[in-house]
Each structure stands twice: as structure tokens, then as C-alpha cells.
Amino acid sequence: MTHCATNPETKILCGDALRERRVALEAALLAGEIFWREMPFRVSRPGWVDRYPEIDAELMAMSSEGLAALLDNNLALVTWLTQRAGLSALFAGLIAVPRVSHAAADAGDPRQVWGIPGRKLQQIEAFLSSAGELTGDALEWCAGKGHLGRLHQLRTHAPVVSLEIDETLCRQGQALAARAGATAHRFVCGDALAPDAGLLLKGRHALALHACGDLHRRLAEHAAARGSLGVDIAPCCYYRLSTPEYSPFSRASRLRLTRDDLHLAVTETVTAPAREIRGRDRETSWKLAFVAWRERSLGEPYRSFKPVPEAWMRRDLADFLARMCEREGISPPPEAAVPALEREALHRLNVMMRRSAVRLAFRRVMELWLVCDLAEPLLGAGFEVGIREFCDRRLTPRNLLLSARRPS
């Protein structure tokens, strides 16, 4: 295990420094709750606007290019808000995490990487390089087609078991392993959330690249209790929980988070193409048009609605509003009112995106806090635990790696 450090030039954040960072991150989240707890999509005028009108005015006057540049840099965004809100608990160094530098791996035999999309392959290579040498056999948690496990087996020659719930993916993964000559790679079709899934961890080192919510939480719990040699986890989709609220592993935590709150930790989507971003903005503006019409029709504040079928977004706004109103049990707007609703929705979208900036200043704070909290059961079981970035955020913004090893 590499030595503990908090300096970004060094290799890992671990031990007492990790726990101290968790406490500091929680303090920043509690101190800045007024900025991140309310969602601008649901609350047209968040509570912080009246307390900090100068921040709101600056955001409203900011150019689109300036706003985009600010939102594209977590460190700059945290610094920007700290200077204006006077939050002593929030500072840029709070989200600084060491990153592992590694040379690009040799692509090797094309059969080894058959069927792996280019960006996914780069993520796997970075993950495996950052995880370093493992002791013993490996268990790939929530494996999909087993790309990660296959490459690890071929490059280390150590046996790998890939756990995956989907039988079709298991068959496809086993075929890819045979094609690549990964003779010591086998699949187990099973549910990672089942009580007996932890039995597979005994005497093995677990690998999990972008395991979601309950899946990465269960892995940390099992690894601590079931005799795992160690784990390397890159968490993702923290909000995918079976419960409406997040239950911290740290018993001293005073932070209370709902699934909606946890969405904040994954709002950074730097890998999305421009066309996808434009589509997402249009979808949001249309939903805002419906919200505006419902507020006007019923005179009620915002209330949530069920997910919108993708097919409804392929027609025009009038058709979308008619379908939404029918589903939600209200009268649709007259055709003549639709253009004005569209203009209002675009205005709301612009204001929402600008006011979201203060909330997004806490996205990496929350994500890093969640990963530090994930380390708690492993630290409690005596593992040496560290956190680092395994790749640049341009490759994937979910680039935090939690590594744990049993002391030798």
C-alpha cells in the first residue's frame, strides 16, 4: 500500500488524513446547506437568493461563456463561491485528491479488447494501472460482460471470477473470454445484493469499476466481514439505493441525505457530446413549460411527477404538453398559449442553470464525502484504505478510486 499523504503531488489519501477529510467535507456540506439542499428546477427562487442577492446578480449578469468555464472547473467554482459567501468551511483544497500517474498500456492482442468501446477501454486500463498489483485471485463485482476481469486475467494470469446477474451478459462474457484465451476467467450468474454473494469474496480481491449505489455499499460491507484480501472500487450513481434516505457508515455523521440530494454528486457530465447536452436542455425546458402551466392552472407550488417517456420528446412542445396534462389530470393549454409557455420555459431554464452554479459548487464535496464514508467499514475492519483519482475527469468524472488492503 502506498504511503499516506494529503499533498496532490503524492500518491494517496489515507489513514487519519482520510477520516479528517471526511469530517471537514461534512462540515462544509452542513455549513453550505442553504446553497445545495434546494433544487432550482423545483424551487424558482431558492432561499439563498434573498440572503446573497449580490451572488445572484453576478450570476445573472455573467456571460454564457463565463458561466460554462466556471462550471467546467470544480476548483475554480468552489473558490468563486467561497470568496463571495464567506464560507470558511469550504475551500478548494477540500476536494483536492492525489492522482496516480501511469503510462498507457500496450493494446496487445486485439482479441483481448474485442467488443470494448474506446472510452471504456481507457477507463479500464487506468483503473487496473491505478489499482496496482493484487494478492491472490480476483472477483469482478457486477461484471457486465467481464471486460475488466478479462483484461486483468490475461495480463496477470491470476484466476478471475466475474459476478453478474444477467444470464445473457454472462454467456456473452464467457464467449469473449474464450475468444481471448482467458482460460482462468469464469462467470458466476448471481445477484450481488443477495446475502450469499459475499461468500465469493473470501480469499479474493474484489474489483468494481462504476458499481452503483447499494452495489458498492454492499461490496464494502461484505469485504470488511467476509475475509476479502482487498478491494478496489470506483463508485458511481450513489443515488441508486433501495431506501429513500442515505444511511451513513460513520456513526458520528450528522448529515442527512435523500436520494434526490445524492443526485448532486453525479451532476458532472463532461463526457457528454454536444448533441446530447442540447437534447437534455430541450427536455428540461419542456418540463419547465409543463411546470409553469400546471402552476398557472392549479395555483399550486411544484410537486414531482413520474419520469417522462423518451418518445414524448420526439414530437413538438404542444403534443408533449397535451400528453403530460392528460397523464397528470389537468386541462392542456390552448394552442395559442404554447409559444408564450415556450419562451417562459427558456427563461426559466436560463435562470435555473445560473442559480444551479452555487449548488454545483458542492457536487465534488458531496461525492468525496460519500467515498470517504464508504471507507468506514473497511477502516473499522483493519484494512489499509486509500482514496485517489485513477484518471483525468475528462475520461470520466466518476474517477475516484477507493483501494483497501488487509495488512500483511
Image (cartoon, rainbow, N blue to C red):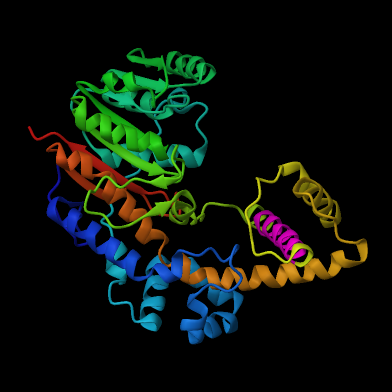
Residue at horizontal 64%, vertical 61%? Answer: 302
In the image, 43: left or right of 51? Answer: right
Q: What range is drawn magenta here? A: 279-295
**Above or below: residue 61 compared with residue 221:** below
Tell me where residue 184 appears, x and y as whole percent: 32, 14
**View extreme (front): residue:** 299
**View extreme (left): residue:** 408
Q: Which of the pair 291/367 is nearer the observer? A: 291
Residue at horizontal 36%, vertical 49%? Answer: 391
**Above or below: residue 64 compared with residue 285:** below
Image quadrant containing the C terminus: top left
Tell me where residue 325 appears, x and y as whole percent: 80, 52
In the image, 39: left or right of 247? Answer: right
Residue 36: which quarter of the image? bottom left
Q: Which of the pair 228/393 is nearer the observer? A: 228
**Above or below: residue 181 compared with residue 62:** above
Image quadrant containing the N terminus: top left
Residue 400 visible in the picture: yes
**Above or below: residue 346 compared with residue 158:** below
Tell me where residue 262 appears, x and y as whole percent: 44, 52
Tell me where residue 194 appears, x and y as whole percent: 38, 22
Residue at horizontal 82%, vertical 56%? Answer: 317
Q: Which of the pair 34/138 is nearer the observer? A: 34
Q: Main secondary structure of the magenta part?
A: helix
**View extreme (bottom): residue:** 54
| Residue 282 colored in magenta in the image | yes
Residue 57: which quarter of the image? bottom right
Q: Which of the pair 10/371 is nearer the observer? A: 371
Residue 60: which quarter of the image? bottom right
In the image, 37: left or right of 45? Answer: left
| Residue 306 colored in magenta in the image | no
